[in-house]
Image (cartoon, grey):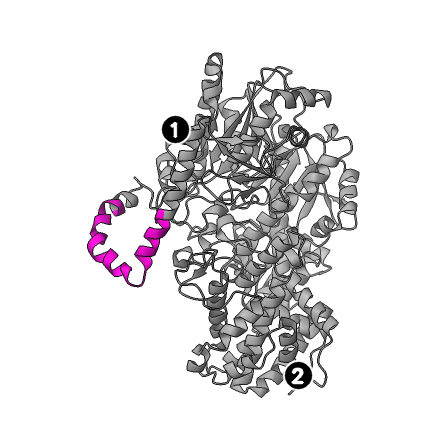
Amino acid sequence: MKQETLLSKEKLRSSVLKACKKVAPAWPLENMVAVNPFLGMTDQRFEAVAQEMDAMGMQMTMPTSFYLSKLESGEISLDDLHQVLKSHRQEIEVTKWLRDAQIDAFSDESDRSLILSELAGSTGEKDWKRFMVNRVSSWAGSYFDKGQATWQSYIDKKEMFASWRAEAVIDRTPDFTGLKGFRKQVIELPEDSFSAIDQCLSHLPSLNDEELDVYFHGLLRSVNGWASYVAYLDWERKLAGQEEVFLQQFLAVLVSWDVCLSLSLRHDQNRRLFKDRLSQVSRSLSSQQTNKSLAARLILQEAYEKSAQRKLLFKFKQRSTSKPKTNSRPLAQAIFCIDVRSEVFRRNLELANPEIETIGFAGFFGFPINHLPVGHNKAETQCPVLLKPGLTVGDSMSNKDHLAQVTNRRRLSRQIAYTWKLFKSGAVSCFSFVSPLGISFLPKLFSDTFGWTRPVPDPKTHGLSKKEQQDLEVDLRKSGDFGISLDEQLALAKGALTAMSLTDNFAKYVLIVGHGSTSVNNPQATGLDCGACGGHAGDVNAKVAAIVLNNPEVRRLLSQEGIVIPEDTRFVAGLHDTTTDEVAFFGLQHMLPEASGEIEQIKKAFETAGGLSRNERSSRFSERGAKDIAFRSRDWSQVRPEWGLAGCSAFVVAERKHTEALNLEGKSFLHSYDWKKDKEFNVLEQIMTAPMIVTSWINLQYYGSSVDNHTLGAGNKTLHNVTAGLGVIEGSSGDLRQGLAWQSVHDGTDYQHQPLRLNVIIQAPQEAMRQVLVKHPEVRQLFDNNWVKLLSMNDEGQVVSEYTTDSQWSEVSAV
């Protein structure tokens, strides 16, 4: 059955672009980024997106049983549920509503088959959707391979759709599974992706705009992992100022597979049923008719979040007043990333030594750079993916001859490792490897098992001795495209200090503490580093910041700008290992001898804080004690080396004095901010358009991985296999997995991340926040559409009101 006329190019392109926009990017394993899986849909209300995702077979709430258990345990109060029902104009007795909700939970059995291959499989003949997904995944793993495969695809990697078509016409796998006419259908397709989509649609019943949108979106969600990776490639093109074309071509592959598969099976009746399904879904989406089960779960989710928010605000209301600050100079100021794991360490550090103040700031410390490690050929981006760094730095040593030796040694070691890998995995040589050489690996297997050695070298330090790691420094000298000029250093220094609200009362030691993690046999290891900075640790940024801020010429120019840094103030870089809660400092060997006593005092405070933090965090594991926590970082069988940012549910932007007396349980991002120093509220604008966006991405990634780990998360970590060097699949086949593994949000008994949307609490005038939202509509959408909650804190540290919508505020209560 063909359409009478083909679609206009404008209509087709519009529908394709609309569907592609709804797919959030997913970064590869080497620089895993915490990203909001609903990124392209935040211009719609949360409830509307939940309805659309439900139609695609994806969930944005927990099952009803989850909320009922929270009601039973008291984590959701009946009063909160009553208030939510009242706000939705449902004048009904709570217990009756709950009985109805339980009945509705078992009555929603609608078929969500929205693509032809899924309908074909519903007859029970074969699971054709799974077959299509496996074949698309196999092709994509080969096409996008980043060097993992020993044997490369023999198809020229030209334009994506043309490459797939060239391989599909000679692939006989569909023939062997019953799709005898599949290759014939593919041969008849044109090589141009849009023309191929148009031709495929001509074989279907006529679809209107809304039905076409649903179909395209459903296809992309059917291979959600690979679609998200391709969306990342388009994200990179957009940053480079190029046209986003990859996801459109990938959609052409999916349309071709789906239609050609249906034509091969000659399921004409399915194509008619397909039209009916699309019509039904598109009508329900346009009318916003949410099914009863989902509507009830959305209300329960809102009540759950209302109860959690009330308990958070109660902490601020009941907080003990911190000691008044004296004008005496603190011994040290320690600047940490806003990461929730830093909240635990900061609190314990202040307890270990009250003379040390802590500051929260984005983990790249205002220095967006590219870093080229010694012995590498490609620079790594050391900043949030929202930014495009324009500066590149490299590594250096005082002894240039030694630097050249280290560079050559690291390059040679990588080449040897690659050759050895080829030998072990080669089709012939693998047999000679296992038989005569296998037994020689027994000692290492033994030592790896007990955590005495690493199964694989640490890529960050591989080829470097401990002394060389200490001697290695970041080189800022300007040379061509490398280095940072004096004017650039001044601009970066002023911007960073102003954004930190650190423009006066400098301590004698200002410690800039980046963070990273340590784990082995963990494909998602970079996800435990900075969740915003492309899966990189913050030590390089800390080193660059320290060098710039210790530069006498930069300080002289800063003084002319009104920022006077005392001569005896020294900036010191450090790295907080969030798995072991150990902190290493860099450059201490350059300190003057008379500073040794104060340095030892600071190091002792950090050691004490590390011990307290390990004990606190160990309660979330079965282990008790620092030794067990440290062993997790070396255990190659450990699926939970640490909890990462699990639990994140709040972002507090305020003076530290309002939070230092609170135990926020490692669930809050903390950004230091003093609005009285921000005369034109430029810093507030930066915070609300960068760190706040990043924290919402992290929160919603954990949220999605909790409510629907099957499609929005990475599944079971023990079944992961790395594919193409860029992602994981669960088992031996299937879609590329995005998001977080089940073990990252659940401990086997209960959730370690409770699915709560982010509460953003800002200490600033409401009018100033309103102006930012007016200026940045894409930020305002997050609040107007219920993706994030915005609350206002007064100068006494009390949270007094919540943003509702259209720049309106309402009072909140912590009672």
Q: In the rendered image of this protein, does residue 564 appear above or below residue 573?
A: above
Question: Which residue bears the numbered disc 2?
Answer: 205
Judging depth in this view, the residue of 474 and 542 nearest the camera is: 474
Residue drawn at x 46%, y 30% is: 472
Judging depth in this view, the residue of 584 and 757 nearest the camera is: 584
Q: Position of residue 111 (x, y in %)?
A: 57, 75
Which quarter of the rendered picture does the N terminus lie within?
Answer: bottom right
Q: In the rendered image of this protein, does residue 462 appear above or below residue 511?
A: below
Judging depth in this view, the residue of 664 and 466 nearest the camera is: 466
Q: Say if mark 1 contacts mark 2, CB within 8 Å.
A: no
Mark 1 Cα-neighbour bin, 10 Å: few <14, some 14–19, many ≥20: few
> Mark 2 falls on what kind of element?
loop
Residue drawn at x 70%, y 69% is: 13
Q: In the rendered image of this protein, does residue 522 appear above or below residue 126?
A: above
- Farthest-out residue, top: 594
> Mark 1 falls on what kind of element?
helix
Q: Position of residue 198 (x, y in %)?
A: 66, 77
Q: Position of residue 686 (x, y in %)?
A: 70, 39
Judging depth in this view, the residue of 788 and 254 nearest the camera is: 254
Question: Which residue bears the numbered disc 1?
Answer: 467
| Left or right: residue 338 compared with residue 128 | right
Which quarter of the rendered picture does the C terminus lie within?
Answer: top right
Mark 2 Cα-neighbour bin, 10 Å: few <14, some 14–19, many ≥20: some
> Residue 569 lies in what quarter of the image?
top right
Q: Position of residue 365 (x, y in %)?
A: 60, 34
Q: Tell me if residue 129 can be seen.
A: no
Numbered range of the magenta stretch: 416-445
Amino acid carrying label 2: it is Pro
Gap in Å between the C-alphas at discs 1 and 2? Answer: 70 Å
Question: Per the image, is 434 magenta?
Answer: yes
Q: Nearer the viewer, mark 1 or mark 2?
A: 1
